Image (cartoon, rainbow, N blue to C red):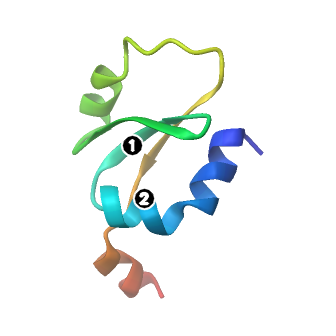
Amino acid sequence: MKRSHKWITQNFEELVSKYGGKYIRVVGEEVIASALTPKEVMQKAKDVVRMEEVSLLKVPTEEELICIL
């Protein structure tokens, strides 16, 4: 499992609270960009160059989580 995936799983509730309804780009254990569309988040984060793998995630809203459960 990628380090970023593990961190996302461990911090999922906080991510939903802070970024619900947005896309986020995560490198390692850090959100490096957030936006309403994948294209926007990739553009915001294009200048961040790191050797680690990058994860892109659509964070559900709290309402979407309730529907899933």
Q: Is residue 52 left or right of residue 50?
A: right
Cα distance in 3D space between marks 1 and 2: 9 Å
Q: Report the disc number at residue 15.
A: 2
Q: Residue at the location (64% across, 48% down)? A: 5
Q: Which mark is residue 62?
A: none
**Label 1 Cα neighbours within 10 Å, binned few <14 / some 14-19 / many ≥20:** many
- Residue drawn at (57%, 15%) of the image: 50
Q: Secondary structure at mark 1?
A: strand
Counting residues from the start of the chain, the first of labels 1 and 2 encountered is 2
Kindly state the secondary structure of the residue where label 2 is placed: helix
Residue 57's x, y, as percent?
A: 45, 47
Asked if disc 1 and disc 2 are in contact, CB closer than 8 Å, the reply is: yes
Q: Which residue is mark 1?
A: 24
Percent x, y for residue 18?
Answer: 32, 59
Name the amino acid type tagged 2.
Leu
**Residue for point 29% across, 21% down:** 43
Would you place residue 69 above or below residue 35 in this image? below
